[in-house]
Image (tube, rainbow, N blue to C red):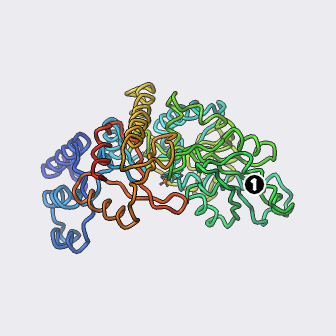
Amino acid sequence: MNSRPPMHAFDRGAKRLSKRILRYALKRVRMDPPLDHAVPAEELRRRVGHTVTLEGIGAARAMSVWENVLAPACISIDHPRYFSYVPAAPTEAAGLFDVAASAANIFGGSWQEGAGAIFAENEALRWIADLAGMAPDAGGVFVSGGTAGNLSALVAARWKWRHESSASMSSTRGVIIASRAAHSSINQAAQVMDVDVVWAQDDDRGRLSGEAVRAAWQSLSAEQQRRTFCVVATGGTTNVGIVDDLEGVGQFSAAHGLWFHVDAAYGGAALAAPSVRELFNGIERADSLIVDPHKWLFAPFDSCALLYRDPRVARAAHTQHAEYLDALRHDDDWNPSDYAHHLTRRARGLPLWFSLAVHGTVAYSESVERSLTVTREGADDIRMSSHLELVLEPELSVLVFRRRGWTTEQYYAWSDKVLTDGLAFVVPTSWRGETVLRMCLVNPATTRDDLRLVFDSLK
Ligand SMILES: *Cc1c(COP(=O)(O)O)cnc(C)c1O
């Protein structure tokens, strides 16, 4: 019979609860969610009272508090008119498989413990590596996000530089070269690592060229050049969706023995889209590459695919050593813990793997192309309108445009209003010092009509 301790018992109450949770999960992945918005903490407190108590509030009440009060106080990122930051739109297969993977609670750090899950994750990583044209021995790991991926890649890059330099370099402060348009997490990684960043100038569209990297390099002293170990390029800038000159930057890096890191956290999904694949030429030169499946590859949070041309370098840089870990050291085992700044990890690549396995890669290409098409249609509509003006021609799926005659205050007031009205979530950004509007499209459910609703509300 049931010998489990009370909190782990599978009695009638627990069965009712599990049905309710699964019903909720199914309903949530299938619903057309209202947009929703944040609610002040005092109001939430007033509505839910205290939830963590000595005796517990019970399953029915906890679920009802979640469903009726707390969940609606979170913006629905899968809403087709969520256009801020980088949205997300997990497939049903990916979202529900995340539930299944959580139920199994697999330790995804070592082959000894999670072989089957790691095999599946590596299949998904291989798909991305193939899209990028990386060699068969490339490999890596899924980490929590682009921020963690960039940091881990740069740590590996520095390890290689120090390892290959003279011993005196082991305490020398390193230098990386990155574009002014690089994601904030690059600067953040540099601060964590205590390395210097030399900012290369992006062009008038925000694109970094090989020439600009050369100019930055030539501005350095011989001593600074000796300390430089990595060049970072972006495969789809977050603010405006521009792909750097990966061929030029990659060639420059190779010629100077510098590690070439490509941050394609947002844009990397477009490697699967034939209409824009050409923009990424040169990405196959990357020593490391990141792509966030939780952005444009229809996986739930949180997931970043981190790939290395030579995973042995990452392994040397990241493997943790401790007496109790010695049992894990079978040399041939693929231990995901060894390839990034982490030890315990959930097998967070499983939702992407499952959805890829279910739907096939063609469906992925088509879904990414759909957002690109709707973006181009939106750009056409902006061009044809009299009240709006494109700031940049979109390369990927980011629309950047201005409302003629508006002040910064007007942009922000409009943004607040359309969110509280439940119409759309669009926050302003700035481009060359001017406040403008930015809409990022990754949800295949988003249509031209969704964009028109937003454009009309700007009249
Ligand atoms: C989103 C993004 C990041 C950061 O990724 P997180 O998953 O939010 O940590 C890094 N680089 C680029 C280009 C991005 O778009």
Q: Residue at x 46, y 38 (%)?
A: 117
Is 241 on the left-hand or right-hand side of 411? right
Q: Residue at x 51, y 49 (%)?
A: 240
Local crowd size for mark 1, using a 10 Å CA cut-off: few (<14), some (14–19), many (≥20):
many
Residue 111's place in the image compared with 240, above or below, is: above
Residue 339's place in the image compared with 427, above or below, is: above
Using the rendered image of the protein, determine whether residue 438 is visible from the camera's viewpoint: yes
Q: What amino acid is at disc 1?
A: Phe
Q: Residue at x 47, y 34 (%)?
A: 120
Is 129 on the left-hand or right-hand side of 454? right
Q: Position of residue 116 (x, y in %)?
A: 47, 35
Residue 192, quarter of picture: bottom right
Q: Nearer the viewer, residue 43 or 427?
A: 427
Residue 34's place in the image compared with 420, above or below, is: above
Q: Nearer the viewer, residue 151 or 422?
A: 422
Is 83 on the left-hand or right-hand side of 316? left
Q: Position of residue 266 (x, y in %)?
A: 50, 46
Q: Nearer the viewer, residue 377 or 69?
A: 377
Q: Position of residue 325 (x, y in %)?
A: 58, 54
Using the rendered image of the protein, determine whether residue 335 is visible from the camera's viewpoint: no
Is 372 on the left-hand or right-hand side of 148? left
Q: Position of residue 245 (x, y in %)?
A: 66, 42
Q: Which residue is mark 1?
A: 229
Judged from the image, the secondary structure of the residue bearing numbered disc 1 is strand
Q: Residue at x 60, y 36 (%)?
A: 280
